Image (cartoon, grey):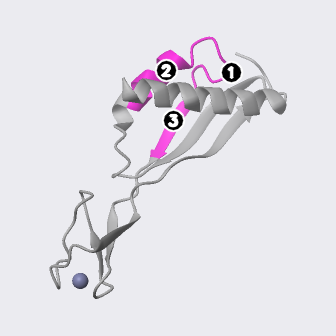
Amino acid sequence: MHEMSIALSIVEAVATKAQEEGAGRISGIDLVIGKLAGIEPESLKFCFSAAAKGTLAEGAVLAIDEPEGVGECGECGKRFPVSFYYAECPDCRSLRVTIVSGEEFLIQSMTIEEEGI
Ligand SMILES: [Zn+2]
């Protein structure tokens, strides 16, 4: 499953970082997952709780920010909301559209506790 491998890489990244900082555990993780990133947040949360078992990230709460997809027209410069990769400019019907937002996927921050579980 796609979300499972993503969950595992998040756990690996945050657990490594928390260990470097001498944390007892990770209580929260803030993620940014754009609506066009192709990642299902609910499914990711589910996979995450399984992937985090036995690591410093076990029990951490995921807070997920989901920026809307935004495209920019290469002909007239208009910016508009998009829900698919292949969008058409609503003004000039151009297909030269660049996605400027919504594909993000990043770990923005995490909250660590000194005490273990
Ligand atoms: Zn246009």
- Residue 56 is tagged as 1
Residue 90: x and y, percent? 17, 78
Q: Which residue is mark 2?
A: 49
Name which residue type carries label 2. Answer: Ser
Estimate the x, y position of residue 46 in percent, counting from the top left: 40, 23
Say what amino acid the circle numbered 3 marks.
Leu
Residue at 17% x, 85% y is 92
88 in relation to 42, above or below? below
Q: Residue 62's mark? A: 3
> Reading the chain from its start, which is encountered first: label 1 or label 3?
1
Name of the residue lying farthest toward the front? 96
Count how many numbered circles sit on residues in the image: 3
Pinpoint residue 9: horizontal percent, then vertical percent: 56, 29
- Position of the N terminus by quadrant: top left
SS for dot 1: loop
Q: Is residue 49 magenta?
A: yes
The residue nearer to you, when weighing 88 against 3, is 88
Magenta-drawn segment: 44-64
In the rendered image, residue 33 lying in the magenta stretch gets the answer no
Question: Badge 2: how crowded within 10 Å, few (<14), some, or many (20+)?
Answer: some
- Quarter of the figure with residue 85: bottom left
